Amino acid sequence: MVRFGFTFPFDGLPLAAHKEALQEAERLGYTDAWSYEVDGVDCFSPLALAAVWTERLQLGTAIANVYTRSPLTLAMSAMAIAEAAPGRMALGIGSGSSVIVERWNGVPFERPYGRVRDMAWLLTRAFAGEKVSERLPTLGVDGMRLSRRALAPPPKLYIAALREKMLALAGAASDGAIINWLGARDVPKAVAAARSGAERAGKDPSQLEVVCRIFVCLSTDAALVDFLGRRAIAGYLTVPVYAKFHEWLGRGEILRPMWDAWDAGDRKAATAAIPRQTIDDLLVSGDAETCRRKIQAYVDAGVTVPVLNFLPASGDPADRARQSLEMLRQLAPNA
């Protein structure tokens, strides 16, 4: 069964104002609410509020960073939400990028695959109720135990992944893969890599969940979509981990002019060099019916939990909030 989610907090809407929005989303048939963190709020605080304000929404982090929190801190934070919303919590972990980890947090961005692998192993054992003492290649703990573990079911564990090796790890060592910044036609390659990891680990690959953040602009204004798409793509796909991801997906040649201009310090030329087809591939836009059809293409390609990330177009926070909520309503499962 396909679930249907959204990304929050909504752009422009303060956390204190999310109660009505989250409850409306639940009434509109959304099944999932996935938080995120970049440079605004942390990924757990919004879930704590949603746990109290909603009754059925599945709650998840996409993602909690494995460099900026210790194993025990991650485990405690996730179990706190699991206590507040029994059976509804999912912990999505990932390595993030060198920009967030190294530049903004001052933590060396080293051995990301190993760090995610080791964190997933330690968390899995802690969520199972074990007292964990282990020294791994990138992490070590001595006597880590969750003293309140028996008070709630542990969260599901998901791993955010971009390329083949990390996707296979997600399939082998977690309940599902979280994918991001790709088009519907790219999904089968990512899903195949994750399912291969599940199969090698002796798991049923058909049971692997695939959570996909899908960027949505509900607009038929081609110039506006072009502007938003270029700004978002230039901001993300020039980051090394995303650049390598799109090389793996086969976009290396068409994105090379953007990367070269960006590396040369010419941001304007880099933005202009993005092919329009890439914008159409990576950004869902159009009227509501068109957007629904494009979102369904992700599901048809293997996504089991589409998570809509609304992109409003306004410099005013109140207007961005209004636009985000309007997209939430128009694209709702029950609309």
Image (cartoon, rainbow, N blue to C red):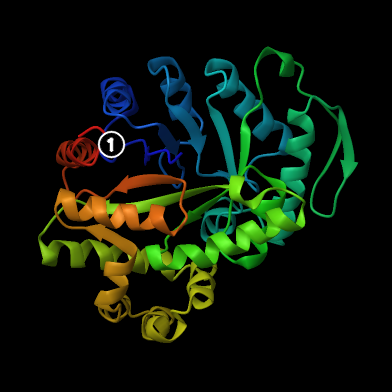
Quadrant in which residue 161 is drawn: bottom right
* Residue at 65% over, 48% down: 67
Farthest residue toward the top? 151
Q: Residue at x 40, y 46 (%)?
A: 306
Residue 244's place in the image compared with 60, above or below, is below
Q: Which residue shows up at 32% across the image and 52% down it?
A: 296
Tag 1: Cα neighbours inside 10 Å, few (<14), some, or many (≥20)? some
Up the image or down, 97 lies above or below 122; here it is below
Which residue ends up furthest to the left in the rendered image?
A: 221
Q: Position of residue 120 (x, y in %)?
A: 72, 44
Measuring from the top left, give residue 321's x and y in whole percent: 21, 37
- Indicate the amino acid at tag 1: Pro
Q: Secondary structure at mark 1?
A: loop
Which residue does the numbered mark 1 point to in the structure image?
333
Q: Say whether residue 44 is left or right of residue 292.
A: right
Horizontal side of 94 relative to 62 (left or right) equals right
Q: Percent position (x, y) of residue 218?
A: 18, 51
Q: Nearer the viewer, residue 227 or 106?
A: 227
Q: Is residue 21 visible?
A: yes
Q: Of residues 95 and 307, which is closer to you in this image?
A: 307
Quarter containing the C terminus: top left
User: What residue is at 62 percent from the left and 44 percent from the top?
Assistant: 68
Q: Is residue 43 at least partly visible in the picture?
A: no
Residue 12 percent location from the top left of the image: 25, 38
Establish if 134 lies above or below 172. Answer: above
Question: Is 123 left or right of 311, judged from the image as shown?
Answer: right
Number of numbered labels in the structure image: 1
Residue 322, quarter of the rendered image: top left
